[in-house]
Image (cartoon, rainbow, N blue to C red):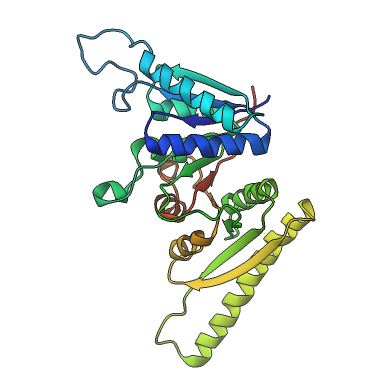
Amino acid sequence: MNRPVVVGVDGSSSSLTAAEHAARAAVQRSRPLHLVHGYLHPLGYGVPLNPYDLGVPAPTEAAQQMLDQLAAELAERHPTLAVQVRQVAGGPAATLVEESRRADLVVLGSRGVGGFAGLLLGSVSGQVAQHAHCPVLVVRPAEQPIPVDGPVLAGVDGSESAALAVRLAADEAVRRNTELVLVHVRAAERGGAVPEEAAESAAAGQAESAELLARAAARIRSDHPVLTVVERPVRAAAPEQALIAASGEAALVVVGSRGRGGFVGLLLGSVSQALVQHAHCPVLVAHPYEPAD
């Protein structure tokens, strides 16, 4: 199945920026691009908000014109790109999660920062990043120019989720013809420790960090012999702080998501959640692919 790159479009500046990122991703992957507009209000969950307004509303002509115009502009900028557009009678988040079952990648914009809105992802981007069935690229508003030729960054912690993120990050680095930077963040040393114990703990932490990075790098170098892989051990108070800071020099950060099931399935992990909200470049949330139909 030729899975497409799917991007959610609602006409906002955030979604238009996401559409350009999605077009580039589709060209890099040799995939078609689908521009999808879920046109029911996200709080309506498919039910008319007005109890006297029975039935599902029809697609709007204005939204169709917006989609057609965007498709034409993207096709002009990317002549090899095949673009399809459609409106779906569903809430934006539910629509994109369903689309993710058959997609190679889902792309969407995030809410802007500032005030209470800055503390949380927009309802659509948050739900899709949490529950998608394929990788999700969240495009944040750029506070500064994103280094297009910058490296692809991935965090390493020894978990299965991080291992998937590293594999996807390597694929992205190959597509972009750039280097892959693997980062392992170990906790800063606690104050007040006996000097001998502190030195022993620091040495053990350095050894563990080096081993984790070496194992991850060896697997990637085996699969991608020509890819430049940089191993970067970092010591910081919190992993998310170090990775957010490092994202300022990256073209893309790839993070693992928390596993599904139970309460854990309702939230992204704290590190991935922080990066999706505060990174200085686009963030790819790694989800395993749904089996093809």
Residue 289 in view here:
no
Q: Residue reaching furthest front?
A: 76
- Nearer-the-camera pick, 214 or 261: 214
Residue 264 in view here:
yes
> Where residue 254 appears, x then y in whole percent?
55, 51
Quadrant in the picture for the C terminus: top right
Above or below residue 74? Residue 55 is: above
Which residue is at a point 38% across and 35% down the rendered structure image?
124
- Nearer-the-camera pick, 67 or 45: 67
Task: Count the marks.
Answer: 0
Which residue is at a point 40% across and 42% down the rendered structure image?
110
Quadrant in the picture for the N terminus: top right
Which residue is at a point 65% across and 66% down the rendered structure image?
231
> Where residue 137 appears, x then y in whole percent?
51, 42
Image quadrant assignment for residue 184: bottom right
Query: Left of 158 or right of it: where is 270?
Result: left
Q: Residue reaching furthest bottom?
A: 195
> Where residue 100 appears, x then y in whole percent?
53, 30
- Nearer-the-camera pick, 216 or 280: 280
> Where residue 253 appears, x then y in whole percent?
54, 53
Query: Left of 10 or right of it: where is 100?
Result: right
- Nearer-the-camera pick, 150 or 262: 150
Above or below residue 234? Residue 229 is: above
Query: Left of 182 or right of it: where is 16?
Result: left
